[in-house]
Image (spheres, rainbow, N blue to C red):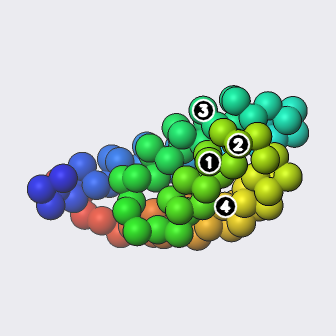
């Protein structure tokens, strides 16, 4: 991002909008026991989280996608529960970041 604060804020704001939608979709696909769709939604969330490298949520969503591809929905449910907490922390951090960053 070449140090562009504006670009960083825009990416964070987009994530703040998209992440709840993706988390809801993950929850729904787990309830429907749709492993194939779960893998697809997890993959989309993984791509969105990849903008924030090094966060624990990224590692959990990678694991969730892997479990979905293996159709291990019981373990995927456990990983999803952990991911919910990690996402909550990430969202709080990004909300703080976007509210304190100066605009160009």
Residue lying farthest left? 2
Q: Tell me the CA gap for discs 2 and 4.
A: 18 Å
Q: Tell me the CA gap for discs 2 and 3.
A: 13 Å
Residue 43 seen in render: yes
* Closer mark to the observer between disc 1 and disc 4: 1
Between discs 2 and 4, the one toward the N terminus: 2
Disc 3: which residue = 40
Disc 2: which residue = 70
Task: Tell me if label 2 and label 3 are in contact, CB under 8 Å.
Answer: no
Find residue 55 and report its horizontal and vertical position in percent: 46, 68
Vertical position of residue 56 compared to residue 30: above or below: below
Find residue 98 and report its horizontal and vertical position in percent: 39, 61
Disc 4: which residue = 83
Disc 1: which residue = 66
Q: Tell me the CA gap for discs 3 and 1.
A: 11 Å
Q: Which is more toward the observer, 99 or 25?
A: 25
SS assignment at label 1: helix
Q: Which is more toward the observer, 72 or 103?
A: 72
């Amino acid at each position: 991002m070449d140090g562009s604060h504006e670009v960083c804020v825009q990416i964070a704001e987009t994530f703040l909008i998209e992440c709840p939608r993706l988390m809801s979709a993950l929850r729904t696909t787990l309830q429907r026991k749709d492993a194939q769709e779960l893998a697809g939604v997890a993959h989309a969330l993984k791509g969105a989280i990849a903008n924030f490298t090094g966060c624990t949520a990224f590692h959990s969503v990678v694991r969730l996608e892997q479990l979905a591809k293996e159709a291990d929905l019981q373990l995927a449910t456990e990983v999803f529960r952990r991911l919910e907490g990690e996402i909550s922390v990430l969202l709080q951090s990004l909300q703080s970041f976007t509210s304190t960053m100066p605009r160009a």
